[in-house]
Image (cartoon, helix red, strand yellow):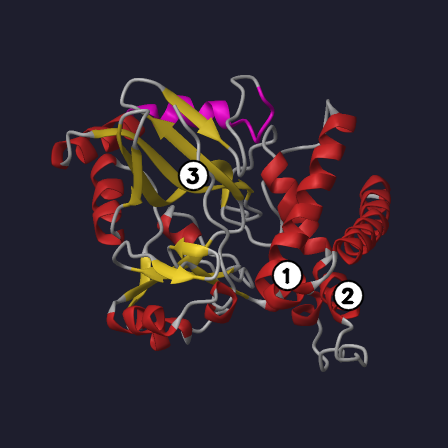
Amino acid sequence: MKFTSYEKIGESLRQLQIDDAGYRLLDKTDWIVTEKVHGANFVFVTDGETIRCAKRKAFLEPRENFFHYQTLVEKLQSQVKDAFALVRERDSEVSQISIYGELFGGGYPHPEVQPEPSVKLVQTGVYYAPNIEFYAFDIAVETGDNQEVRRAYLDCDRAIDIFAAVGLFYARPLFVGKLERAWDYPIGFDSTIPELLGLPPLADNQAEGVAIKPMQSIEVETKKGRLRPVLKKKIAAFAEDRRYLQSEKWPEPPELGQSDRLTLLQWEAFNLVTENRLVNAISKIGPMAGKRRRQSRQLFRAFVDDVLEQLYQNQPDALAAIAPQERKLLNQYISGEARKLFKQFFHNSARD
């Protein structure tokens, strides 16, 4: 079976670099708003017989330490295979499906809820459940053979019907309507997840934010090729850009000459090297225990790559225009800022 990672979610339509025709298409379709769960990206991949699981960038090994995902496989394998069967009912050429979602939970500090001592939080900041749970939000299907494989996402209403039919916990619609109103959906609300799981409410348990995408599985042309537009809005506490973390006015970029793109890119990168981004990168790699040195290198590379990917979304023209030597200096700058953050973060973690 083949693994394809979930596309990076944009924080604005501007970042997606969509042309005018694309904007007109997006205005015509309905959009769905769902709660964005603060967890670890997780995927079930199946051909109806075998199930493999993946984290953000790669398949997981059967004994790999990734939030005890093996217990979820045992719990949900029937539902995953049933989902494949429902997809095949409509299209017998489907050879594989990928169910994308988030692992979440691991703690719920409420006096009426029994804690699970052997379970650790997937992410801190929002409490969802005492156990590790799976939150499904998309299904991608593959058809064809090895010579020509076609991949597409199911429409959101179809995916929701399948999740509900097989008994997978899934992202419920908070709003369905046109793009402008979907984008304006207010964030800062308390998480809806505990109530859906039958748990008593916690005070001040704000959701990370919302995910916003078209109800129909559509793609639009961008400077990076065709893509499926998916957006996110987070509350300031979970922002991965230090400019959103500050309550005061954003810092101004340094004075630039007409051609000083490197300075601009370094300033942009400085704002992207944040603890929230590092915490999210850790959730994609898994706990740091055991193979610490190898995982540390893997984490550092993943973190730097994520900064560069976000930098490309924020400043595509400037990044494309710099010379190879400037690119090398930019990479060195990002690596240096990342090392400073890593040193501070893990020093503080060791003290805690």
Q: Which residue is mark 1?
A: 320
The residue at the point 32 percent across, 40 percent down is 140
Task: Depth check: give the residue in front, 22 or 111.
Answer: 22
Tell me if residue 240 can be seen: no
Amino acid at pointer 3: Phe
C-alpha span from label 2 to label 3: 42 Å
Q: Amino acid at mark 1?
A: Ala
Q: Which quadrant of the figure contains the C terminus?
A: top right
Mark 2 and mark 1 in contact? Answer it, CB < 8 Å. no
The number of discs equals 3
148 left or right of 320? left
x, y percent for residue 219: 33, 57
What residue sits right under mark 3 in the picture? 134
Q: Is residue 111 magenta?
A: no
Front residue of 114/307: it is 307
Q: Main secondary structure of the magenta part?
A: helix
Q: Residues within 10 Å of mark 1 (few under 14, many from 20)?
A: few
Q: Residue 186 sits in which quadrant?
A: bottom left
Q: Which residue is label 2 attached to?
A: 262
